[in-house]
Amino acid sequence: MRRSVFTEDHETFRSTIREFIAKEVVPSYADWERDGQVPRALYRRLGELGVFGIQVPEEFGGAGVTDLTYLAVLREETARAGVTFGADVVHTCLVLPYLLEFGSEEQKRRWQPPFLSGETMTAIAMTEPGTGSDLAGIRTSARLSEDGTHYVLNGAKTFITGGAEADLILVICRTAPYDPQNRRAGLSILCVDTTSEGFAVGRKLDKIGLRAQDTAELSFTDVRVPVANLLGEEGAAFSYLTHNLVVERLGAAISGYATAAAAIGFARDYVRERQVFGKPVAAFQNTKFALAACAAEVEAAQAMVDKALVLHAAGELTAADAAKAKLFCTELAGRVIDTCLQLHGGYGYMLEYPIARLYADTRVSRIYAGTSEVMKTIIAKDLGL
């Protein structure tokens, strides 16, 4: 179906990114997966290409784009090549909205230039060993010093994407005692410089997928954080987090349909070439029907995401809308990629084939940014149930 969300400028950007991936990412990607992270030079190159500045206001050197259509182009092109840009999505889609929405003018002027260039990479630390989707259960704490100049931060975080390479980490912590009558109160966001004494990166976690994207455990032992690094108001973090989850979940939906579409492309190319019983796998009716069904489902997901992109640009995308898009697209991606891997036969299980990487990489999309079960809960509440 013809799409209307992309303009000529988007397609020019797409061509640039596609060429960059082919020349500077694909040849080295297997090495990055073995290393468990991308080289810092990649982030600087993305900065040079303007990737990190798309949504940054023009006054800080960015393009000032307020919608997520260019993000969609990026996710489509990385999926098409079966690669990722490491933790770039956290930098631009998770952290940046917090800095732009809740950062002071001083903080924006301090952090935006190195953010844009890729010299300063960022991460956000929410999840703890005992706290996942239940953000109100966060135990990492920070107390204000007696002279009021800094916070003293203590605690631990886990599953932090980009945590090992980040220079600045937005840490969700308790700045007021836990109140069982109001579990959401007392949470704040402190921006922690990773050169601070008492900050440490623990294990780099060994994942089944997204292996070029570092995921780490972090610890904070009496880390001094200047009050100038408090993002927004003290105690208001829970509302900030829920505010940005809409964008995070839309991003997951975009990646879902993009990886599903890429899987169809990989499978189509493979079955045309692979010979079984003297003819191409593509000649069998089962192959044709399986890919036809996948293509129809992906078109539906794409239409849903395109509508969500339009609603987001108009400021009308609700939490329930985002939950529906994430649930549908990530569950769809799991089904479609599984079908496409099956059509590869035994080779689909080999990591040298991009379909195998997609299979492993995509599984976590039904967990992060809120599990599928959490999405169903949100949708059910929207239905009045």
Image (cartoon, rainbow, N blue to C red):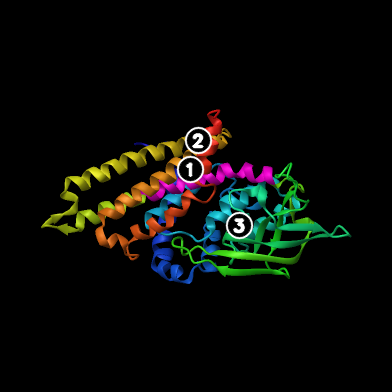
Which numbered disc covers residue 12? none
- Mark carried by residue 310: 2
Does the stretch in magenta take in 171? Answer: no
Can you name the residue that lies furthest to the left here?
278
Q: Secondary structure at mark 3?
A: helix
Residue situated in front as seen by the camera: 188 or 114: 188
Pointer 1 local density, CA inside 10 Å: few below 14, some 14–19, many at least 20? many
What range is drawn magenta here?
238-261
Q: Secondary structure at mark 2?
A: helix
3D distance between C-alphas at marks 1 and 3: 28 Å
Residue type pointed to by label 2: Val
Q: Which mark is residue 326?
A: 1
Whether residue 351 is visible to the viewer of this picture, yes or no, is: yes
Of the numbered discs 2 and 3, the one sitting upstream in the chain is 3
Residue 120 is situated, as x and y percent measured from the top left of the image, at 63, 63
To which residue does mark 3 refer?
A: 116
Task: Say whether residue 260 is left or right of residue 343.
Answer: right
Q: Mark 3 is on which residue type?
A: Leu
In x, y percent, where is residue 207?
Answer: 47, 63
Instruction: State the residue at coordinates (54%, 48%).
Output: 369
- Nearer the observer, 312 or 374: 374
